[in-house]
């Protein structure tokens, strides 16, 4: 059997890699551009349209003192501001609570209550393990049809695209109020997270942890 010249193998390999890179870049650019007009800065959140609820996406908490990280604190503060200026009636705190000693939604709710938000207007989503799960459960479990998504811009495009892909009418507010340690890592990781979200929405259609529907009074 005739051997394929190694230069041809390298050429074919290079072409395949190039095609994959172009495809991935195209997907990311398409996702971001399709929702970019829906993004508001926290400085002009008063210009955002009113919605049923603000969905505040979870992030890491310090397991030692169970306090929100800087990233999470900024998200909660932005959600509180939306609530206090009357843009939303409810705050949905969606995060990870798959183990008993780690409870993002509870930490988020406590933080908001200490800032003056009534507990009756705070909704806890304990199974928001991923962005896709949070968006899916917002509609299927809590009956939310429209919302303001609250997270940092590096994550906001994916959140907006995912929620819209699952049938929610959403806009987003960028909650960034500072430069975060590890920002380059977050930006780099988001490339792969967006690709994963694209396939979840259009190909895989995974079903997250669900349960009984919950009436949150909206």
Image (cartoon, rainbow, N blue to C red):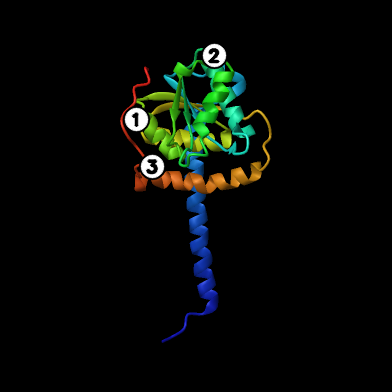
Q: Residues within 10 Å of mark 2 (few under 14, many from 20)?
A: few
Distance from label 2 to label 3 (Cα)? 33 Å
User: N-terminal of the two: label 1 or label 3?
Assistant: 1
**Count of numbered circles in the view:** 3
The answer to whether residue 209 is left or right of residue 114 is left
How far across and how far down the image is residue 114, in percent? 58, 19
The residue wearing badge 2 is 84
**Which residue lies at the image location 45% right of the left edge and 41% below the top edge?**
98
How far across and how far down the image is residue 128, in percent? 45, 36
Q: Do the residues bearing badges 1 and 3 touch, measured as CB atoms within 8 Å?
A: no
The residue wearing badge 1 is 141
Distance from label 2 to label 1 (Cα)? 25 Å
The residue wearing badge 3 is 201
The answer to whether residue 166 is left or right of residue 109 is left
On the question of residue 57 being in view, the answer is no
Q: Which mark is residue 153?
A: none
How far across and how far down the image is residue 209, in percent? 36, 40
Q: Is label 1 in a helix, a strand or a loop?
A: loop
Quadrant of the image containing the C terminus: top left
On screen, residue 30 above or below 169: below
**Looking at the rendering, which quadrant does residue 161 occupy?**
top left
């Amino acid at each position: 059997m005739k051997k394929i010249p190694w230069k041809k193998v390298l050429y074919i390999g290079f072409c395949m890699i190039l095609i994959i890179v172009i495809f991935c870049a195209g997907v990311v650019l398409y996702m971001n551009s399709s929702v970019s007009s829906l993004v508001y800065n926290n400085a002009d959140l008063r210009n955002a349209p009113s919605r049923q609820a603000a969905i505040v996406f979870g992030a890491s908490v310090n397991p030692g003192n169970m306090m929100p990280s800087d990233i999470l604190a900024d998200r909660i503060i932005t959600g509180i501001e939306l609530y206090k200026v009357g843009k939303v009636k409810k705050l949905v705190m969606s995060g990870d609570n798959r183990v008993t000693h780690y409870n993002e939604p509870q930490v988020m709710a406590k933080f908001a209550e200490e800032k003056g938000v009534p507990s009756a207007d705070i909704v806890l989503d304990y199974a928001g393990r991923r962005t896709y799960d949070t968006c899916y459960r917002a509609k299927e479990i809590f009956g939310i049809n429209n919302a303001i998504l609250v997270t940092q811009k590096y994550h906001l495009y994916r959140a907006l695209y995912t929620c819209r892909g699952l049938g929610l009418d959403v806009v987003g507010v960028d909650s960034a109020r500072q430069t975060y340690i590890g920002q380059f890592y977050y930006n780099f990781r988001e490339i792969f997270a967006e690709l994963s979200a694209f396939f979840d929405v259009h190909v895989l259609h995974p079903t997250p942890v669900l349960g009984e529907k919950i009436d949150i009074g909206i």
